[in-house]
Image (cartoon, rainbow, N blue to C red):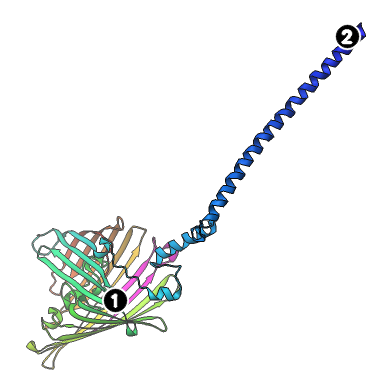
Amino acid sequence: MTRTLCAALLAAACLTAEATAQQPAQRQVDSLAIELRALRLRLDSVRAELARLARRSPRDTAPAPADEDLAALRAAAAQAVGGDTTQTADTASARRFVGRERAQSQLNPEISATGDFRVHVQTEGTQHDNFELHEVELSFQATLDPYSHTKIFAGVSEEGIEIEEGYFYYTGLPGRLRLDLGVFRQQLGELNRWHLHAVPETEYPLVLTTFLGEEGLAGAGASLYRAFGGLGTHELYAQVTAGSNDGLFEGGNRPAYLVHLNNFWQLTRSTFMQIGATGVYGTNPDTALKTRMGGVDFRFTWRPPDRALYRDWTLRGEVYALEKERGGAGDTRLGGYAGTTYRLGQRWIAGVRYDYVETPEGPNDITRQIVPTLTWWQSEWVFLRAEFAHRFTPVGADRDRLLLQAVWAIGPHKHETY
C-alpha cells in the first residue's frame, strides 16, 4: 500500500513539472507568432510603397539624402553670389542679374558729431567768455558710387555754420592716383591736415596760426595723391587751389600751388619715422604780392606692439620759412615747433610743445610759447584735457593761460584726424 502511494505521488509530481515547463515554451511560441504577423504587415506596406513609386515618373522620384544635401548647398551658394550655381557657363553668361534693391540705411551717409567745450582763465586782458562751447563739428561721409566717395565737415559755433571741408574723391584711377575735388584742408606738413579736436593740444602750433591764420591752410581746388614704394613708403601730393588765404595771399583769388612729399620708414617692430617736405607758391596781383613758403616736418614714434594700449612715445616737429615779396623785395621769416607726447597708461597721455615764430612782415618780432598738457581718455568717445600755456611776447607782455577741455563724439568717425 505504501509502495503504491509513493508511485502515485511521483507520477503526479512529474506531470506537474512537465506542465510547468511547457508554459514558458508556449509563451515564446505565441510571441514569435505575433512578431511574424507584424513583419508580414511591414512587408506588405513596403511592397505597396514600391508599387506606388513604380507607377510614378522618374522626374517625380524624391531625391536621395545626398541629393538633398547637395541641393541645399547649391541654394545657399546661389543666395550668397546672387546667381544659380546649377547653370552651366553658357547659360550663366547668357543671363544677367542686376540687383536694384538697397536697404534704406545704405542710402544714408555715415553721420558723426564732435563737441568741444572749454573753460579757461588767462592773465592778459579782461576775463570774458571763460566758458565756451568752442565748436560742434558735423561729419557726413558716404560712398557715392563704385568710383567716388565724399566727405563733408561743417563747424557750428556762435558765429554760425561754416563748411570746413566739402569734397569728393576718386580712387582707383589710372596710375594708382587719387583725385580730390572741392574744399579741403591742405597737406602742409602734418598737423595742418588734422581737425582741431584731434591735435595733441587745444590749438594748432603758433607757427601755423601766425603764418596761415587761426584756421590753418584750406582751399577750394583739386588735389592729386600718389603712393609708391622703394626704400620705404612715400606719398606725393600736388594741389592747386584758389589762393584766398588771408595770411599767405591776403585774400587773393589767383591759383596757389602746393607740393608735399612724405617719406615713411618702419625701423623696427616698435618704431617708425617719417620725414616730409612742403612747398607753397601763390600771388596776389592786387597787392603786387608773391608768396613762397617751404617747410620740413619730422615724426618719430615708439609703440611696442604687445603694449600699444599702455605705452607709446611720439616726437614731432615742423620748421617753416616764409617769404612775402613785394616789388622784388621781401624778407624771409622763420617759425616752427617741437612737441612730444608719452602715454603713461591706457587712459593717461602727457605732452609738451615748444613754439617759435617770427612776425610774417614788418619788424622782426619773435614770439615763443611752451604748452604742457595732460589728457585723460575716459573712453573711446570722451576725453578730458588740462593745458597750461606760457607765451613770451616781444614787448614783455607775457601771458599765462590755464584751460580745461572736454571733447566728446558720436558716430562711426570719432575724433578723426582728417
Q: Residues within 10 Å of mark 1 (few under 14, many from 20)?
A: few
Can you say whether 35 is above or below 115 in the image? above
- Would residue 205 be seen by someone viewing this image from the given angle? yes
Of the two numbered discs 2 and 1 in the rendering, the one whose residue sits closer to the viewer: 2
Q: Is residue 5 left or right of residue 410?
A: right
> What amino acid is found at the position of numbered circle 2 in the picture?
Leu
Q: SS class of the residue under badge 1?
A: loop
Q: Which mark is residue 5?
A: 2
Q: Look at the image and say whether residue 295 sits in the magenta stretch.
A: yes
Looking at the rendering, the stretch of residues picked out in magenta corresponds to 294-317
Residue identified by numbered label 1? 147
x%, y% of residue 403?
Answer: 20, 60
- Front-most of residues 66 and 210: 66
- Would residue 207 be seen by someone viewing this image from the given angle? no
Q: Look at the image and say whether residue 149 sits in the magenta stretch.
A: no
Q: Which mark is residue 215?
A: none
Question: In terms of image quadrants, where is residue 260?
Answer: bottom left
- Front-most of residues 60 and 76: 60
Q: Say whether disc 2 or disc 1 marks the residue closer to the N-terminus.
A: 2
